[in-house]
Amino acid sequence: LDLAKLGGHHVVVRDQNTAISVPGNVCMISIASVWEPDMAPEGCHSIHAYTMEPFEGWAKGPGYEERKRERSDKLYEALERVIPDIRERVLLEMIGSPLSHQQWLRRHKGTYGAAIKAPDMFPGPATGIKGLYRVGDSCAPGVGLPAAASSGVITANTLVDMDQHFALMDKVDAIAAAAGRGPR
C-alpha cells in the first residue's frame, strides 16, 4: 500500500442494506496529514475517524473504557477498507465518545456539528446582527475541519470582494514565506 497516494477524505458505508442513521454504519475518515505532513511525524499520518453515536447510555465509570474500545471496532473496520493493515500501523490511539466531545469540545450532548436534516441547509455567515458573522462546523458548508475552514473563507468573501481577498492572501503568503513556510 502506497500511503503517499492516500486520499485525504473517505466515507465508508459499512452495510449498504442498513440505514445510514444506524450508529456506526457510516464512518467518516479524514487524513489531514495528506495535505499538511507536519501534522504527524515523518513517515506517519494523523487520522481522524468518526461516526454517529447517540449520547444516551454513555456514563463514565466501570466499563466506560471497554465500551469505547468496543465501539471503535466499527471505525477500525471502516479504516481497514482504506488501509487494510491499519491496526498494525497505529502508534498512538485516542478513542473518544460523546462524553469526550461534551467535556473537551463543550458540545451539547457530545454532538459533532449541527444536526440538520435534508432538505434544510446549514445556515450561512449572516446572523441578522450588523457586523456579527458565524463560522465553524455548525454553518455552511458543514461538519469537519475543511468545511469549518471553508466557512471562514466564505465569510471573508462576504466582507471583501475577490480582488481584496486575493490581495490579503498574497500578504499571508508573504508572511509565511518570511517565516520560512511556503508552498510545498
Image (cartoon, rainbow, N blue to C red):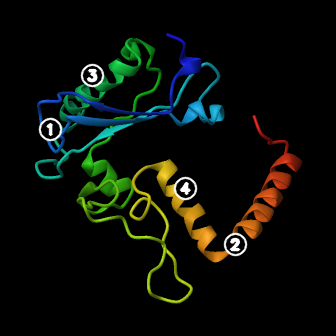
Q: Say few, some or many: other residues with alpha carbon within 10 Å of mark 2 (under 14 / 14 to 19 / 20 or more).
A: few
- Closer mark to the observer between disc 1 and disc 4: 4
Q: Which label lies toward us, 1 or 2?
A: 2
Residue kind at label 1, given as amino acid type:
Pro
Q: Which mark is residue 62?
A: 1
Whole-number angstrom distance, CA of label 1 to CA of label 2: 56 Å
Q: Is residue 63 above or below residue 90?
A: below
For marks 1 and 4, give the CA distance. 38 Å
Q: Secondary structure at mark 4?
A: helix
The circle on residue 77 is 3
| Secondary structure state at the residue bearing disc 3 | helix
| Residue located beneath label 2 in the image | 161
**Relative image position of residue 170 (x, y in whole percent):** 81, 57
Q: Are marks 3 and 4 in contact (CB under 8 Å)?
A: no
Question: In terms of sequence position, does the residue under pointer 3 or pointer 4 come before the other?
Answer: 3
In the picture of the structure, the residue carrying the numbered disc 4 is 149
